[in-house]
Amino acid sequence: MPNQKLFPTKDTERDEYYNRAIPYIDANKVRLTVAPATATDAVNLLTNWNATYPQSKNPDTRTRTITNQKDQLISKIEEALRNIYADIPESVLTDADRNTLNLKKRDTVNTPRPAINVVPFAKAQGEAGGLVEFICRTDSDSSRASVLPEADGIEVVFNVGGAQPVSPSDCTRNFFSSKAKFRISFDLSDAGKKVNCFVRWKNNSDPAKSGPWVAVSAMVTD
C-alpha cells in the first residue's frame, strides 16, 4: 500500500484524520476484515491521543514529557494504521473507504523491483520472557520502523551463544518478518546467552536482489 501522503504532516490535520479514520475502521472492521483486537488496539491509541494531544497544545499543560508522549503516539498510531491498511484486501475497499481513509488504489502493474544495495538501520534488544525485539528502519525514514519499498520484509539469520559468526553462512537458524518491528521468541534456558545475528532486506520473489547483511546482537533475558 503506498504510504506517500497517506497521513497529514500538521498536528491539527493529524488529529482530524485519526478521529475520522479509526472510528470508521472500528465501525467497519468486519467488512474490512480487520481483527477485532487490532481495531480495539487502534481505538485505545486514539483514546490516548485524545487525552494527550490537547495537553500538548495548551500552554498551561504543555511540557516536554507531554510533547514526547504526543510524538510517540504519532508513530504508534501511524504504524498501526499502516499495518491495518496493508492487510485489508483490495477487493473489499469501496470509494467511501478510500475517501475516508485517504487510500489510493494499489498499483496492479507488476514492475520488476531493482536490486537492493542498502542495509537496514537495525537494532535488537532482549525483553522479558525470552523475547528479542527487532526494529528496522530505512535510510530515508529513520524516525520510525519501516520496510524498504523494494523489499518484502526482513530476513534474520542467527546463532544463540557460542562464538561470533564471521558471516551469515555460519548461522544455523533463520527468521523472516514482513513487518519492520517484530519479536523472536527464545527458550528461557537460553537466558544470559548472546544472540548473534545478521539482518538484511529480503526480496522473496528474487532472493538474488536481496540487500547486503548487517550484524546486530542482543542478550536473551528471562
Image (tube, rainbow, N blue to C red):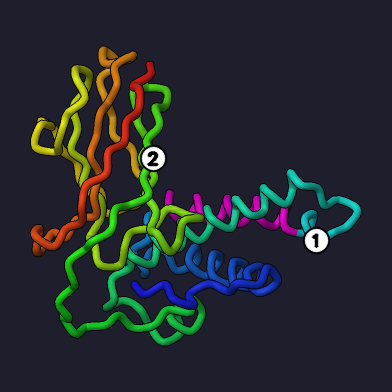
Residue 58 versus residue 103 in the image, above or below = above
> Which quarter of the image is occupied by the C terminus?
top left
| Secondary structure, magenta segment, majority class | helix
Quick one: SS at disc 1?
helix
Q: Nearer the viewer, residue 207 or 153?
A: 207
Residue at 51% in and 79% down: 100
List x then y, in percent, for residue 104.
39, 82
Tag 2 residue = 123
Residue 135 versus residue 204 in the image, above or below = above
List x then y, in percent, for residue 116.
21, 63
Q: Amino acid at mark 1?
A: Lys
Q: Quadrant of residue 124?
A: top left
Name the residue at the front extreme. Answer: 166
Q: Is 88 covered by the magenta stretch?
A: no
Name the residue at the right extreme. Answer: 60
Q: Nearer the viewer, mark 1 or mark 2?
A: 2
Quick one: SS at disc 2?
strand
Residue 76 versus residue 190 in the image, above or below = below
Q: Around disc 1, counting alpha carbons within 10 Å, would you say few (fewer than 14), some (14 to 19), or many (20 or more)?
A: some
Q: Quadrant of residue 126?
A: top left
Q: Nearer the viewer, residue 92 or 210?
A: 210
Give the number of marks: 2
Q: Amino acid at mark 2?
A: Lys
Q: Which mark is residue 57?
A: 1
Q: CA distance from mark 1 to mark 2?
A: 33 Å
List x then y, in percent, for residue 34.
38, 60
Residue at 52% in and 70% down: 24
Bounds of the magenta span? Answer: 37-53
Residue at 26% in and 25% down: 186
Q: Earlier in the sequence, mark 1 or mark 2?
A: 1
Q: Around disc 2, counting alpha carbons within 10 Å, would you say few (fewer than 14), some (14 to 19), or many (20 or more)?
A: some
